[in-house]
Image: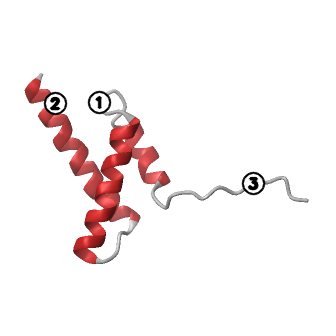
Amino acid sequence: MNDHIEHDQSPYADVESALRDEFAGIHSAITVTRCVEAAHYGALEVTGYAHPSLVERIARKHLHVLALVASERG
């Protein structure tokens, strides 16, 4: 019997992890996840495909904009 349990991992898990590290102290993990999800759906809607590198670029832009808005409210 194999004791190794495989979990369904999001194709964007590495993207989320990298963006969480990049925006630590600026955005919560849930905000990063929501931006990655929004980027995924946006890419699908516009291009029909959501490659992880495209999703990462879109999500990063979202996170930068949110940080800018937060700093202006400051």
The alpha-carbon separation of the residues under discs 3 and 2 comes to 41 Å
Q: In this view, does 17 lie to the left or right of 61?
A: right
**Residue 39 numbered tag:** none
The tag earlier along the polypeptide, 3 or 2, is 3
- Please rate how many residues cluster around mark 2, counting C-alpha atoms within 10 Å: few if below 14, some from 14 to 19, many from 20: few
Q: Whole-percent x and y of residue 36?
A: 35, 53
Q: How many marks?
A: 3
Indicate the amino acid at tag 2. Ala
* Vertical order, 26 against 14 (above or below): above
Q: Do the residues labelled 3 and 2 touch (CB within 8 Å)?
A: no
Q: Name the residue under label 1.
A: 26
Q: In this view, does 71 lie to the left or right of 12?
A: left
The tag earlier along the polypeptide, 1 or 2, is 1
**Secondary-structure class at tag 1:** loop
Q: Mark 2 points at which residue?
A: 70
Q: Whole-percent x and y of residue 28?
A: 36, 33
* Vertical order, 19 against 74 (above or below): below
**Secondary-structure class at tag 3:** loop
The alpha-carbon separation of the residues under discs 1 and 3 comes to 34 Å
Q: Name the residue under label 3.
A: 5
- Tell me where residue 1 sits by quadrant: bottom right
Q: Do the residues labelled 1 and 2 touch (CB within 8 Å)?
A: yes
Q: Is residue 58 left or right of residue 8?
A: left
Residue in the image at 46% along x and 45% along y: 17
Indicate the amino acid at tag 1. Ile
- Tell me where residue 23 sits by quadrant: top left
Image quadrant in which the C terminus is located: top left
Q: Whole-percent x and y of residue 8?
A: 60, 59
Indicate the amino acid at tag 3. Ile
